[in-house]
Image (cartoon, rainbow, N blue to C red):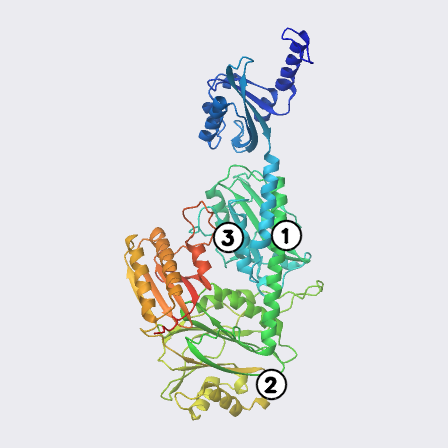
Amino acid sequence: MRDGHRSKADPADEDLGDALLDALFSRSPAGLHVYDARLRLVRVNTAARLMRDFPTDRMVGRSLSAILRAFDVADRAVIEQTARRVLESGRPVFDLPVRLRSRLEPGVEAVVSVAVLRLQRPDGTVVGVAAALTDITARVRAEAGLRLLNESATRVGTTLDVFRTAAEFCDLAVPRLADTVTIDVYDTVLRGHAPTPDSREREAALRRAGFRSVAGPEHQGVPKVGEITTYPPGTPYRTALDTLAPKLIGRLDQDAPWLDPERRRDARILTAGVHSILLVPIRARGLVLGLACFYRWRAPTPFDDKDLALAEQLTTHAALCLDNARQYGRERSTSRILTGRLAHPATPGAAAVDLAHAYLPAGTGGAWFDVIPLSGARIALVAGDTAGSADTADPAAMGELRAAIEALSDLDLPPDEILERLHDLASRPQPVLAGTPDLPPRDTAPASCLYLVYDPVTRLCTAASAGHPAPVLLHRGGEVEALDIAPGPPLGRDIALYRVTERALPTGTTLLLYNNALLGGAADTARSLEDLIAGAVTAPDGSLQALCDSLTRDLGADRLHHDAFLLLARTHTLGPDQTNTWTFANSPANVSRARQAAAAQLAGWGVAADLVDDTALIVSELVTNAVRYAEGPIQLRLILGETLTCEVTDDSSTAPHLRRALETDENGRGLFITAQLSRRWGVRGGGRGKAIWAEQERRRRPPSHL
């Protein structure tokens, strides 16, 4: 022996080698696979057998390729190439991540870190490779959860809008946590309130605020976003809300007694093959806002306790964002009630109408009106009132109702459907304010509402009334008439039955919206106002605000006993010089034709070059989306008003869904690009399908200098 080295024949060296082999193959916590020079498995250690239920008697002697296939390993070709490279070069590879599945439980995926080393004799003869496997599944999963939580801080709650916040949450959680995610909130959240943990109102109906599925944007939830849903007693949903405790259903029994194939939601669960569910109540600041539901049906791995803990953390952040949106909606609506302001004073829809208004307060706070811009340069004129005196009128209830109207207006529903949903909201007893749970829910006074939509392109006026006086029309020639609208019951009273009235209005027609208090409660208010207007001297192009002020003076504001208002809207028409429409056959070749047609039209209108480029890209993406998912002809419409609107209509009734495509994705960027280039965008249902629209700020081409 020299310099501390033992000879080959030293028995101690042989004992040490035997002990090392015994430790590696019998007691090492890391898995060890040994392959020969032809990459055939010759030996595995105990950890490998226990960790992955390794069937040694079947696998020894098989090739590396066969073993990788048996364990459903992804990127098998890359792993084989790595092993051969180590075998040839002798350079080891460390920290090679490998995903595999247990043969006994294919639904369970594991992640291991692999170190690959070449084996050779003292004389340099290569005899094979050894692969040491360390299970890092828990670490990888924890890191993924932390990334998801960090992203939620920036991606969820970017606006003070309940529906947008719910959509952002669903987008974040799918597919990284679940295959499908839904958010249902109590209707009272949209009205600015929410039940307390011990409130009886937790048995009330909820409204679907968010939905996302890996099945694609064409698949809608049951119910759809914006629709009412209920959780029957005896179901896990109701149990989660009653106990306010998150619930994990690790393995869903398809024969569970609470599943009823006759219920739409349960039928969808059974049809999709959902095998695991998480239910997390949405709570914030001592209030119950709703329920978040997570489903797995495509990913084979069931939810576990760690998934439930992550879902709770994500939902906690989303709950705070939803509650911020709730409080903002309540405070904004109440403020507008007390000041009599328009809903959107900065965007009054000048392309559609000229506006003038007067608000005559008497201290009751129950009368209100709003002007809400809609897609396609349209405008919604909304008026409402509640019965009662200064002691009985409820401005807070009106604020809740207005907040709900704004939320429903974003869905671009027709007037009769909006009134039906408002009637459903108003039919329920209102909760008391937070902090007074012992008081019974309050009953609301009957509320009237008029919802009118004017389209400056078609000149079509569409309206429905819930017990509110019909608007009066003042034509340019001086003729005065009341718009013939079939009145439905006040909101929250009788059976919701509302009919839509459609009327094409000549350009320059003035609409007058008001409430009964303006005329002192006269029996024939429409006739009285018609007589008053007919007696007024006004030129066709006279000052609209002057006419409004004159009428309110003649009515005697000092004699009012209830808040009153008068809203005047003089209609405009967008002619051929501001709008154009093209119809294309459903063919990929027409994408470029649509883009060229739009660019040529915008150049003719003299808009800025960068706006032409942005619009051409939006047209390309939206028409491509229509070609992909629809079957019939595709219609493209451009509207140049206060903003530039691009609309693409197809015959598919399924609404698209915005998702954030990864850098490696080839598809899924159309709506994301559209959203980035637009001030706002959305989807509007129609008789033959749907229209996807996008609005951009109008920018004119700068003048050229010679």
Q: Position of residue 254 (x, y in %)?
A: 52, 39
For label 2, count other residues whose C-alpha is less than 10 Å away and answer few (under 14), some (14-19) or many (20+). some
- Res 394 quadrant in image: bottom right
For label 1, count other residues whose C-alpha is less than 10 Å away and answer few (under 14), some (14-19) or many (20+). some
Q: Residue at x 59, y 77 (%)?
A: 366
Q: CA distance from mark 3 to mark 2?
A: 47 Å
293 in relation to 123, above or below: below
Dots 1, 2 in contact, CB < 8 A = no
Which residue in the structure is indicated by mark 2? 561
Dots 1, 3 in contact, CB < 8 A = no
Which badge, 1 or 3, comes first in the chain's sequence? 3
Which badge, 1 or 2, comes first in the chain's sequence? 1
Q: Nearer the viewer, mark 3 or mark 2?
A: 3
Mark 1 belongs to which amino acid?
A: Thr
Secondary structure under the numbered disc 3 in the rendered image: strand
For label 3, count other residues whose C-alpha is less than 10 Å away and answer few (under 14), some (14-19) or many (20+). many
Q: CA distance from mark 1 to mark 2?
A: 47 Å
Mark 3 belongs to which amino acid?
A: Phe
The image's mark for residue 316 is 1
The image's mark for residue 211 is 3
Q: Position of residue 294 (x, y in %)?
A: 55, 46
Secondary structure under the numbered disc 1 in the rendered image: helix
Secondary structure under the numbered disc 2 in the rendered image: loop
Which badge, 3 or 2, comes first in the chain's sequence? 3
